[in-house]
Image: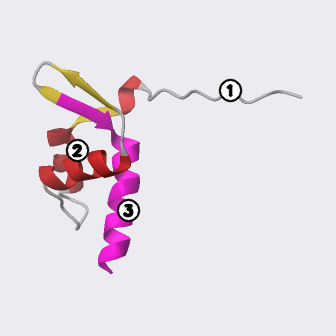
Amino acid sequence: MAIQTIVPYTVASDMLSIEEIKDQLKDTGHPVTTGDIKRWIREQDLYTEKYRRDVYVSYSDILMAHQEHVVSQN
């Protein structure tokens, strides 16, 4: 019986800057502001990385927060 490996770290390729995420979400029909994304990071205590001037966060985590936001609006 194999044991599934659990990796508690975010995959580097999943990390996007807040501006990149905002640009990705603008075409969904439910655009958000950078303030919305920063609030989700703070409220859900999402893991972030800072590199130079940009803050990077998991796109997958933000997609889940975005989904919750859209569902709560309807």
Name the amino acid, label 1.
Thr
Q: Residue furthest right?
A: 1
* Secondary element at image label 2: helix
Number of numbered discs on residues: 3
**Residue found 21% across the figure and 24% down from its top:** 50
What is the C-alpha distance between the residues marked 1 and 3?
A: 27 Å
Q: Residues within 10 Å of mark 3 (few under 14, many from 20)?
A: few
Disc 1 marks which residue?
5
Upstream in sequence: badge 1 or badge 3: 1
Tell whether position 60 is magenta: yes
Above or below residue 19? Residue 25 is below
Quadrant hosting residue 2: top right
Residue occupying image coordinates x 37% and y 73%: 71
On-image quarter of the C terminus: bottom left
Write down the residue under mark 2: 21
- Give the x, y percent position of residue 39: 23, 52
**How far across and how far down the image is residue 8, in percent?**
54, 29
Q: Mark 1 packing: few (<14 Cα in 10 Å), some, or many (20+)?
A: few
Instruction: Tell me where residue 69 appears, x and y as whole percent.
Output: 32, 66
Q: Which residue is drawn at 25% across and 62% down?
A: 28
Q: In this view, does 8 lie above or below 60?
A: above
* Marks 1,3: beta carbons within 8 A: no
Q: Nearer the viewer, residue 53 or 23?
A: 53
Q: Which amino acid does label 3 sit on?
A: Gln
Q: Give me the disc on residue 67.
A: 3
- Compared across the picture, whether 9 is left or right of 65 comes to right
- For the stretch drawn in magenta, the main secondary structure is helix
Q: Nearer the viewer, residue 56 or 41?
A: 41
Alpha-carbon distance for marks 3 and 2?
14 Å
Chain part drawn in magenta: 55-74
